[in-house]
Image (cartoon, rainbow, N blue to C red):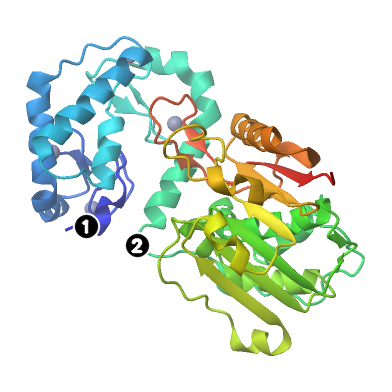
Amino acid sequence: MEMKNNNFFRHNVCHTCKSISQDTMKLCAHCKTVSYCSKKHQADDWRNHKTICKVMRQEKEDLVWNITNSKELCSYIQKRLIFWNLNLNRALSKSEFQMLIFPRYCVVCFSRDKLFACHRCLSTFYCSEKHQQQQLELHAKFCEEFRLSLEFDCRLYDRNECYFDMLSLKNNIDAKLLSIDDRWEFVRELVEPEVPLKRFQFLCNAERLFSGITILFALEKSRILINRIATKTDLTIHLVGSTELEVFLNWHLILEIWFVWIQNLKCLNVIFIGPELPANYRFNIDENFLINYEINMKHYKYLYHEIFDIIPKPDLVVAFNSGVHEHETTSNDLWEQSMNLLTQNNIPLMLTAYNLKEINNDLKRIQKLERIKTVYGPCRNPFRNFRPLINWEYSDSEPLYYTNNYLVIVVKEDP
Ligand SMILES: [Zn+2]
Ligand SMILES: [Zn+2]
Ligand SMILES: [Zn+2]
Ligand SMILES: [Zn+2]
């Protein structure tokens, strides 16, 4: 049975209750990997932990840690993955996989002796103060973000912590505001009402809203929305390659913002399409809200081309963090048959990605297919998600990533 605390693993965080306090934390004496805040929480987790703990003990004899650079570390982790799979007789849980790819070692010399963690982020280890000093400048770039990402994981782990109850969207949005572009203050006010929120709380709210603001931004940049008036009173938006990430946004609030912001909007169809969507999901939209506006939220657990002909035609197509280039020319390329549907004549397509390299590769794939005009970007998305996420691709050099970090808007030119 998958236990809830198995959703993620972090060094120096109690694996049972996810409390963060380095000083009281004790490592499991056998594997020296998993931490607990108390004897009780270690005992509570033992049934769950003992099999992987045993594998880690065996591993010490069979896999020699003799690593001097990151290339060797990569191949060690690949061997480790094989070893764990062979000795476990079951699939790794999410947190076990994270233990696997993040062993404790000094980031300077790869030694595993006398390690201590950076006191602030608890995510980076050193063998000596000298080695910590050597990394000071480099580590400073990531330390705060590591810490923030740790707090997000631990604090949000068993409660859906967010700060919307304080939020009251004022219907009197300044009438002089005509464009969301560069109106950071306006957006900030939406996610941060009168009481100043801590940065962490602000980012929690932003995480559930900013994808919706990003769509408004795309509507403006592609001139579907001019001075807060839409070219049509009913709009249809396709969110292709959707996952639960998009479904679980705060749609109630996003819709409210959209209808207040777009002054002539009467009817809205938001259609989520993607094989990774949850099978059944009911969008919770306030009844009072539906009296005044027509809103249709649909989700289809299909590929785009399988469903395209039977759904309303879009005014805007959005693909959030979809990595359309990623599996190009491989057998698990789910995009191939849907590619030419992404761009229909004069219907803008917005793509977002984790970094500039990925957005450029996505764009290249689209350009191969059609005569495309770039309407906006590729560039940093001002309404990106600010929550730092740990990069689980151990061969990648960037330790953290952000959803919707970069965006590009394109449109297919008339032939
Ligand atoms: Zn605990
Ligand atoms: Zn252990
Ligand atoms: Zn060292
Ligand atoms: Zn740090």
Q: Do the residues bearing badges 2 and 1 touch, measured as CB atoms within 8 Å?
A: no
Q: Is residue 189 visible?
A: yes
Point out which mark residue 158 bears.
2
Q: Is residue 196 visible?
A: no
Which quadrant does the N terminus fall into? bottom left
Which element is circle 1 on? loop
Q: Residue at x 86, y 69 (%)?
A: 174
Q: Establish if 312 lies above or below 107.
A: below
Q: Residue at x 8, y 44 (%)?
A: 50
Left/right placement of residue 12 relative to residue 141 reads: left
Point out which mark residue 98 bears.
none
Point out which mark residue 3 bears.
1
- Residue 217 location (% of width, % of height): 76, 54
Residue type highlighted by circle 1: Met
- Residue 52 location (% of width, % of height): 13, 40
Q: Residue at x 58, y 51 (%)?
A: 199
Q: Nearer the viewer, residue 97 or 274?
A: 274
The quadrant in which residue 71 appears is top left
- Residue 401 location (% of width, % of height): 52, 38
